[in-house]
Image (cartoon, rainbow, N blue to C red):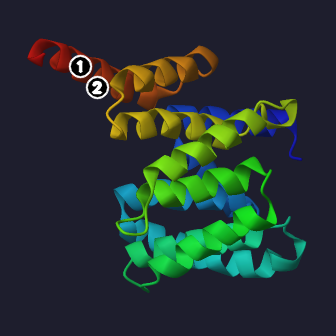
Amino acid sequence: MKPFLLLSYLLSAFLSGEMEVWRAHIDSTIDLSYEYGYCGAIMAENKSAAEPYVIRFREHVEQQKSALPPGHYEMYMSAVYVYELRLHRSFHPASSLSLAREAVKKAPNDPLTLTYCATALFYAPAPFGNKKEALTLFLKAEQLFRADEWKECWWRPSAMMYIAQCYDKQGDTGRAIQWAKTVLEEYPDYLFIRDIYLPALEQKQINKHNES
């Protein structure tokens, strides 16, 4: 386990969207959890900038294979496939999802494998994706994340955010708002939810009420 202060520092950077902090961290050490997260974040902004990090991420996953906990090699390789697909370096969405499911089979009570598989299902295009199944996995992961050992883990607020998004995608705006507020009770500095997502949900609820 990483020192508490480092975890807290990296979590704070996640909540505030300061991903250059994560870049500095993964430039100084091999840390697959943060490499995975950083590649996803930078991919949304600049695919060209993400590409060398995706290449390095794959190399590190292979290097660390024998030392990883059960299911984590499959989880991270699934992420590599997703990122390579988005960079048009390969095309294997079915293989990616298969690896995500295999990760959960190998570690069914690991909140990281559950969260990753749920995320894969959330984003996977039809016929591969399944947001109802994703919600079930996210909810199970969130329960496991309540243990003290996960207190400063960035995956937890991310999973909670996705729970809100799953309810939103299913048309349950009220429950999505409840979950977004629950996240902010524990993570008040989660800027995406505080400044963007929750206001958008509340506006959507107002629009629904006006239309009814």
Question: CA gap, disc 2 to disc 1?
Answer: 5 Å
Dot 1 corresponds to which residue? 203
**Which label belongs to residue 99?**
none
Q: In front here: 136 or 143?
A: 136
For the residues labelled 2 and 1, say whether their Cβ atoms are less than 8 Å apart. Answer: yes
Secondary structure type for disc 1: helix
Q: Quadrant of residue 28?
A: bottom right
Rendered position, 178 above or below 112: above
Q: Disc 2 on helix, strand or loop?
A: helix
Residue 197 vs 21, above or below: the answer is: above
Q: Residue 10 in the image: x percent, y percent?
A: 68, 40
Mark 1: few/some/many CA within 10 Å (<14, 14-19, 20+): few
The x and y percentages for residue 40 are 49, 58
Residue positioned 18% across, 20% down in the render: 208
Q: What residue type is labelled 2?
A: Ala
Camera-side residue of 3 and 58: 58
- For the image, the number of numbered tags is 2
**What residue appears at the point 88 percent right and 40 percent down from the top-left corner?**
3
Q: Position of residue 47 (x, y in %)?
A: 38, 67
In percent of width and height, residue 55 lies at 56, 79
**Residue situated in front as seen by the camera: 82 or 206:** 206
Residue 57 seen from this side: no
Tag 1: residue type?
A: Gln
Q: On the picture, is 184 further left or further right than 204?
A: right
Residue 73 falls in image quadrant? bottom right
Q: Residue 200 carries which label?
A: 2
Going 63% across and 50% down the picture, which residue do you hit?
115
- Quadrant (top left/top right/bottom left/bottom right) for the C terminus: top left
